[in-house]
């Protein structure tokens, strides 16, 4: 029995990671689970920076080569000494990367241009770049951004076959308004007169507002998900997952599962936002494609020129049933602007209307409740096993 439970632990932890919930893993550690896995990449980056920053314009070629080799060996020496102090093989991959190693990654490459050529600005820029690299690696790895996005896309892919149904159900009035606005001259005139970059900023502003609104609603959504279920319901959910063998290790009267930590809470919140973002982007993209096709078919080149009072920027032109049709930059920008507005409106409706949430977020909620049920079973078993390990 214990063997089956041991065999279920690793698959359960991998299941958490695949769903973008690595912080559900018992005693999840950044030094062990993030920096250690990233150690080879960080070392390569540090070596490249050291070799690139070591030569000086004042050095002869052979001196620059020697300085680069010396800097390279210095990085290797730091790695070897660190392993030796831990009584491990000199060039073994570290089992635990702590604050000292992370600090060396930032400081050592930054010191090279300062020490060799007095280039303080280059050193500060290198240090800042390394800090940014560490931040990106921590966020993408610690919170499982890549598997989280993959899971959210897979979960949201079910909506692809029903995009038209989503639009017809969620946006009937807005769709009518968008079409009416689309057939006025203003969107095309704005698209022609306003630089493309500013149109992109406006669309980004819509998405920023949508993200902000979603972030405000996340605490309530996560709070609803974390409402405790009975152990009977938890067992039933976990029985369909890799954690099923762990259910046999639960006591007859198990204590309530531990409350989510701040990092676990944030992890769940990110999954919720990523999943909702996929659905919103799906609706926005569908609206954009709909308007582009509609514009190509019903706004011929001559009409677009009348509306704009200037010749439009034609990208593709063709004839159909005796009409000169075209795909123009103005059409793409007008459709993009209105699609961004549609995405914002859909976000507000999705997160403020209980009917929309019941229809479009039910699958997401059930999937996350399943994850929370597996967490409850997994943590209960792991906490009971901890005294035996220590």
Image (cartoon, helix red, strand yellow):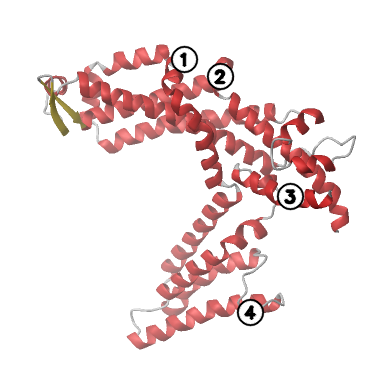
Query: Dot 2 corresponds to which residue?
Result: 359
Query: Dot 3 corresponds to which residue?
Result: 9
**Which quadrant holds the C terminus?**
bottom right
Q: Give the image location of residue 244, x and y in percent.
A: 75, 40
Query: How far is the residue under mark 4 from the one under mark 2?
Result: 58 Å
Rendered view: 318 above or below 56: above
Name the element at disc 2.
helix
- For this view, does 201 lie left or right of residue 155? left
- Which residue is nearer to you in this view: 374 or 341? 374
Question: Does residue 386 appear in the picture of this structure?
Answer: yes
The disc, 2 or 1, on the residue closer to the chain's N-terminal end is: 1
- Which residue is nearer to you in this view: 345 or 146? 146
Query: How far is the residue under mark 2 from the one under mark 1?
Result: 10 Å
Query: How far is the residue under mark 4 from the one under mark 3?
Result: 32 Å
Give residue 90's mark: 4
The residue under the point 38% across, 26% down is: 286
Query: Dot 1 corresponds to which residue?
Result: 169
The residue under the point 77% across, 28% down is: 233
């Amino acid at each position: 029995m214990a063997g089956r439970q041991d065999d279920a632990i690793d698959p359960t932890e991998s299941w958490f990671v695949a769903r973008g919930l690595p912080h559900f893993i018992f005693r999840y550690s950044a030094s062990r689970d993030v920096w250690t896995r990233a150690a080879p990449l960080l070392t390569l980056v540090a070596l490249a920076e050291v070799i690139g920053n070591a030569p000086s314009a004042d050095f002869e070629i052979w001196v620059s080569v020697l300085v680069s080799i010396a800097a390279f060996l210095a990085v290797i020496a730091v790695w070897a000494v660190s392993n030796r102090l831990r009584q491990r093989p000199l060039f073994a991959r570290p089992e635990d990367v702590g604050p000292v190693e992370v600090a060396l990654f930032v400081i050592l490459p930054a010191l090279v241009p300062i020490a060799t050529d007095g280039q303080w600005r280059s050193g500060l820029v290198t240090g800042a770049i390394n800090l940014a690299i560490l931040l990106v690696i921590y966020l993408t790895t610690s919170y499982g951004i890549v598997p989280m996005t993959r899971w959210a896309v897979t979960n949201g892919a079910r909506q692809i076959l029903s995009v038209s149904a989503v639009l017809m159900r969620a946006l009937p009035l807005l769709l009518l308004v968008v079409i009416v606005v689309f057939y006025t001259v203003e969107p095309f005139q704005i698209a022609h007169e306003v630089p493309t970059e500013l149109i992109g900023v406006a669309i980004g502003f819509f998405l920023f507002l949508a993200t902000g609104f979603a972030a405000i609603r996340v605490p309530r959504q996560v709070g609803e998900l974390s409402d405790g279920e009975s152990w009977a319901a938890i067992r039933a959910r976990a029985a369909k997952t890799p954690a099923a063998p762990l259910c046999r290790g639960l006591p007859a009267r198990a204590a309530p599962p531990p409350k989510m930590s701040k990092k676990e809470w944030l992890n769940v919140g990110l999954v919720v936002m990523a999943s909702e973002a996929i659905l919103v982007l799906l609706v926005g993209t569908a609206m954009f494609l709909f308007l582009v096709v509609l514009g190509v078919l019903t706004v011929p080149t001559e009409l677009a020129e009348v509306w704009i009072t200037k010749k439009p920027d034609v990208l593709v032109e063709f004839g159909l049933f005796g009409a000169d049709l075209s795909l123009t930059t103005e059409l793409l920008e007008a459709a993009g602007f209105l699609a961004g507005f549609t995405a914002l409106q859909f976000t507000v409706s999705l997160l403020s209307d209980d009917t929309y949430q019941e229809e479009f977020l039910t699958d997401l909620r059930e999937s996350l409740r399943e994850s929370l049920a597996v967490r409850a079973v997994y943590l209960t078993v792991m906490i009971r096993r901890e005294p035996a390990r220590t």
